[in-house]
């Protein structure tokens, strides 16, 4: 992590297959970095693994609590899978390696129906195969997919390899209008009001330059 006078903080998150202790440490450091309220936080994702579903939700929770003054830039230097996809999508501005890919699998989980049946019986203590019960990891993946669906149509793309041109079609990268919208959503209220006034002023006829081209040669 490099500090450039609070103008820009670069923060790297490794994508690991098994990194519980690593993410415990990195999440704590991420909270410290955001507490300094940098103007921009550049979050780099790199590695051949992925962020565990539950850790992706934890990282999302931390990022969503950042100051409105901090712009989040997420950069994927590697292919993204499952929970890593969600973390990348959270950026106000997103960057991805041109030949990288995005993938998220289907969750083997459905919400349990409400029941009044007893789940614990002291008189009948029988062994139950853990795989016959709901898997918390799959529940976390289901939540991750719900959140990804706010950016991409999960039902259409789940289980498919998504390339950069497809991400571009959905306006997730290199889209100035979307970037401006996302940035304004996290901008402090007084700054947002100033931006609106400035935009209206620029569109006003009185603000146009007196050196415009003659009408007959304008297109």
Image (cartoon, helix red, strand yellow):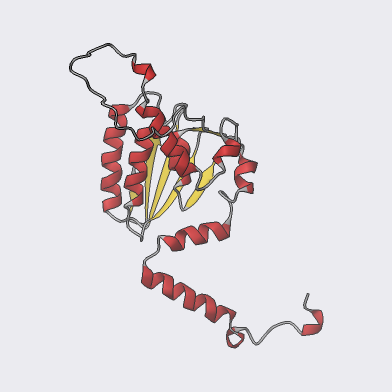
Residue toward you, 162 or 114:
114
Query: Can you tell which quarter of the image residue 50 is in?
Result: top left
Q: Position of residue 186 (x, y in %)?
A: 40, 60
User: Residue 5 location, x and y as percent?
Assistant: 32, 55
Task: Report whether residue 97 is seen.
Answer: no
Q: Is residue 179 left or right of residue 71?
A: right
- Height in image: 163 above or below 190? above
Relative placement, left or right, of 125 versus 130 is left
Left or right placement of residue 38 versus residue 144 in this view: left
Left or right of 121: which side holds 181? right
The location of residue 101, given as percent across then percent down, is 57, 34
Residue 126 appears anywhere in the view: yes
- For the C terminus, give its image quadrant: bottom right
Query: Looking at the image, which is closer to me, 83 or 106?
Result: 106
Is 40 in front, or is 194?
Answer: 194
The residue shown at (64%, 48%) is: 169
User: Image quarter for residue 53?
Assistant: top left
* Residue appearing at x 69%, y 83% in the figure: 212
Total tally of numbered discs in the picture: 0
- Where, quadrant-wise, is the N terminus in this rendering? top left
The residue drawn where x is 45% and y is 63% is 184
């Amino acid at each position: 992590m490099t500090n450039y006078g609070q103008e820009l903080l670069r923060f790297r998150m490794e994508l690991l297959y098994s990194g519980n202790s690593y993410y415990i440490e990195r999440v704590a450091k991420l909270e410290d970095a955001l507490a300094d309220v940098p103007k921009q936080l550049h979050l780099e994702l790199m590695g051949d693994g992925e962020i565990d579903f539950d850790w992706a939700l934890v990282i999302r929770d931390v990022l969503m609590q950042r100051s409105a003054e901090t712009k989040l830039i997420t950069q994927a230097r590697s292919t993204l899978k499952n929970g890593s996809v969600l973390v990348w999508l959270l950026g106000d501005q997103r960057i991805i390696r041109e030949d990288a890919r995005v993938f998220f699998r289907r969750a083997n989980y459905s919400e349990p129906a409400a029941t009044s049946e007893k789940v614990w019986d002291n008189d009948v203590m029988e062994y139950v195969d853990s795989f016959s019960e709901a898997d918390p990891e799959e529940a976390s993946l289901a939540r991750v997919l719900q959140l990804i669906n706010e950016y991409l149509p999960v039902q259409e793309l789940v289980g498919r390899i998504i390339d950069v041109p497809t991400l571009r079609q959905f306006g997730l990268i290199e889209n100035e209008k979307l970037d401006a919208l996302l940035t304004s959503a996290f901008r402090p209220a007084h700054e947002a009001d100033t931006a609106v006034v400035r935009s209206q002023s620029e569109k006003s006829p009185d603000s146009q330059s007196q050196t415009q081209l003659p009408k007959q040669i304008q297109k």
